[in-house]
Structure formats: structure tokens, C-alpha cells
Image: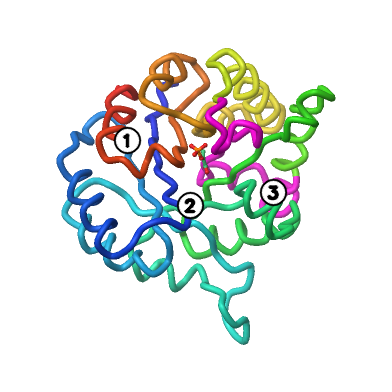
Amino acid sequence: MIRQKIVAGNWKMNGSKETVSSLVEGLLKMDTSNSEVVVSPSFPYLSQVSDALSASAIQVAAQNVSDQAKGAFTGEVSASMLKEFAVKYVLVGHSERRSLYAESDAFIASKVKLLLEEGLSPMLCIGETLAEREAEQTLVVCQRQVQAVIDLVGIEAFENIVIAYEPVWAIGTGLSASAEQAQEVHSAIRQFLAELSQTVAEKVQILYGGSVKASTSSALFEMPDVDGALVGGASLDAEEFIAIVKAAG
Ligand code: PEP
């Protein structure tokens, strides 16, 4: 099955009104006809970025969402609020949230459930730490993280979920997984899903994330189970990000 590639930029907690505006201006020059392009600004810039991209094919993602629908949750942002800003995707389970903010598998699954109820698409980030890889626990960890979501929303819900395999040791370190390492894990995740639904497994887009650069992206995109990339640092540079989008086809 041919799956459309997605190239998503995670801007993390970076930018200002001015730099966001010039980044978007740079991105608007790109050809988006071959893959789906997504950018993920911080909450305060969602409105600005959504408006600036409204006439383009570039989609907007949010970096986080509350696990609650509404109410007395000071500082939180709900899925229904995000919808008002033409957000299509929401990152959930990013390793920075799992490790720095102690988000558990079950908590992440509850965010996925709320997003799906609002018609938003979760980008579910999974991945092992270096210690887990060295202990040969990579697949066990990834399967556990996916299973927590399946337990709450069921396998069919994965028709509307994008998975991002992001080995923690590769995020922001400059140490990208090799294309072969990424393929091995992507293929195993797909097989794991296939045990429950062959149809879902064939459809689900699995992105790779972790120090992706233009120079490493072509080899990754050649892998049959790598359906795109979630790009952190390199997505803050319009030229570099556009080169990654080009490499995706
Ligand atoms: C990320 O934060 O999702 C990420 C992949 O970051 P980087 O590309 O900077 O490693």
C-alpha cells in the first residue's frame, strides 16, 4: 500500500512573533504537492500561524493538549480550543513530556481519546531511551506505549492516529538512528498492529524522529516502513526543512 509521507516540524518552545512570521514566510515558498507538510508552533503562535498558512496546504499541529475536556484546569488547553485554530494534528507522548512532565502511558492514552472525540488526529510519539535500547528493550517499550492507547481507544482508532517513532537517545543529540535501525523498529510496530488488524497496520503512517536533517532524510525515506519524519531542531530553519520535504518526494 502507498502511504502518503508526512513531514512535520516540531518547533518546541522556540520563536517569537517576528521569527515565527519569517519562518512561515520562508515555508510558504515550498512545493507541498508530494507529501503532507505540518508545522507545530507553541500555543501563543497558533492563531498567527494558522492564519498565515490558511491559503496553503501546510497543516498546523499543536504540541500538547489537556487530558480534560474543559473546566477548572488552570494553564491547560483543550482539544476543542485547538480545533478553533484549524489545528489538524496534536503531538502526544513526546519524550520531553514523558520524561520532564512525568506523563504516563495511561495519561497519554486519555489525551488521544479526547482528541479523537474532537475529530483531531493525534501524533503519538513513542520510543526507547538509550538504556532501554542497550538492554534490548526497544520493542517491548514501543509496544507497551502503543498498547496503552489500544487498550483505551481500540485498534480501529489507529486509522486516525499517526505514530512517530522517536528514540529518546536521538532527540536533539545529533545522533540519528540509521535508516536500517529505524526500518527495523517501524516494521516491528507495524507487525504488532497487524496482529490486531491488517488493514490498520497497512494504513497507519509511522514517522521517524530524532535529529533528522536534510543530509540524513533521503536514506530514511527510502525505507519501506518510514512514512515521513517528525523534525525538531532542523524545522526551525526554513531552507533545511524544505530540503527534508523535498527528500520525502
Ligand atoms: C523532536 O523533538 O520531536 C525531535 C525529533 O527533535 P530533533 O529533530 O531536534 O532531534
Residue indicated by mark 1? 241
Mark 3: which amino acid? Val
- Please report the residue visible at 43 percent of the width from the left and 30 percent of the height from the top: 228
Q: Report how far apart the C-alphas of labels 2 and 1 lie in the structure.
A: 22 Å
Along the line of sight, the residue nearer the viewer: 168 or 55: 168
Q: Which residues are magenta?
A: 148-175
Label 1, residues with CA under 10 Å away: few <14, some 14-19, many ≥20: many
| Whole-number angstrom distance, CA of label 2 to CA of label 3 | 13 Å
Residue 121: which disc?
2
- Please give the residue where the numbered disc 3 appears in the rendered image: 149
At mark 2, the secondary structure is strand
Circle 3 sits in a helix, a strand or a loop, which is it? helix
Residue 167 lies, in percent from the top left, at: 64, 32
Q: Is residue 73 above or below residue 53?
A: below
Specify which label sits upstream in the sequence, 2 or 3: 2
Q: Is residue 14 above or below residue 218?
A: below
Expressed as whole percent of the image width and height from the top left, the position of residue 13 reads 47, 58
